[in-house]
Image: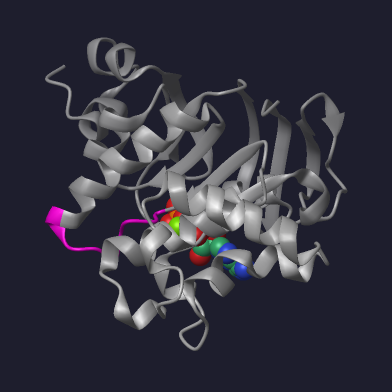
Amino acid sequence: MGSITLEQVRKNFGEVEVIPGVDLEINDGEFVVFVGPSGCGKSTLLRLIAGLEDVTSGRIVIDGQDMTQAAPARRKLAMVFQSYALYPHMSVRKNIAFPLKMAGMAADEQERRVQHAAGILNLTDYLDRRPGQLSGGQRQRVAIGRAIVREPSAFLFDEPLSNLDAALRVNMRVEISELHKKLATTMVYVTHDQVEAMTMADKIVVLRAGHIEQVGSPLELYRSPRNRFVAGFIGSPN
Ligand code: ADP
Ligand code: MG
């Protein structure tokens, strides 16, 4: 589970066409990175997949099912927000369990899932703390934990590391890659950072002004960038 297909997905905001028509195949278990300059439509594309925005036209198929019109909760995708989206007055446990509580899940099942996620993320000893008592990296892990407990078929990340300092960013990059290996779940990761794209991705999608310039593995894009824009963005010598 965790395949996502976009067929001629278009998005207009009023008169402005932000995504002119994108076709994309994301395979089960893949780590896919959307990369491109600010304003090129990365977040919009991710929000369309998540169902947080409606497509203007086109189709979104998740695990073989047409989800174009489906509400976000039905898509079984979990969006990971930046760590500042945590509730400061709630414990780590309550922050992680929050989406389960909202879904009306039984308390013992909530706790089982929180313990499982905390184990994966090395947060077991911090469940009774508040976000303000954690380091930046731990807070980001709590935000990821909140996604893990939903047991999604794919994780969607929108620049999750952009507010962290450089050293922590490197750590979290490694942690998210390790998490991907552990869970073997599809991850779609938005960044404008070439290094993140090159080091984390199975597949990179290079976006420019809402359309896809090139899709390929980091090595393919590095060796055979289709044009100067891709080469410039990937840091290839060509
Ligand atoms: P990125 O995430 O790559 O920086 P975005 O997807 O946020 O880019 O934005 C792509 C374009 O769509 C930008 O020109 C932005 O101004 C525009 N845009 C995004 N969201 C909205 C919105 N809700 N209403 C109008 N324009 C928007
Ligand atoms: Mg964005």
Q: Give the range drawn in magenta.
A: 159-167
Front residue of 189/192: it is 189
Q: Is residue 214 magenta?
A: no
Residue 158 on image: x %, y % = 47, 53
Location of the C terminus by quadrant is top left
From this viewpoint, is residue 193 visible? yes
Determine whether 48 is above or below 227 in the image.
Answer: below
From this viewpoint, is residue 15 visible? no
Location of the N terminus by quadrant is top right
Q: Does the magenta stretch include residue 163?
A: yes
Front residue of 131/172: it is 131
Residue 216 on image: x %, y % = 42, 17
163 displayed left or right of 121: left
Q: Residue at x 49, y 89 (%)?
A: 89
Residue 126 on image: x %, y % = 38, 68
Q: Residue at x 41, y 21 (%)?
A: 202
Front residue of 130/73: it is 130
Determine whether 163 is above or below 171 in the image.
Answer: below
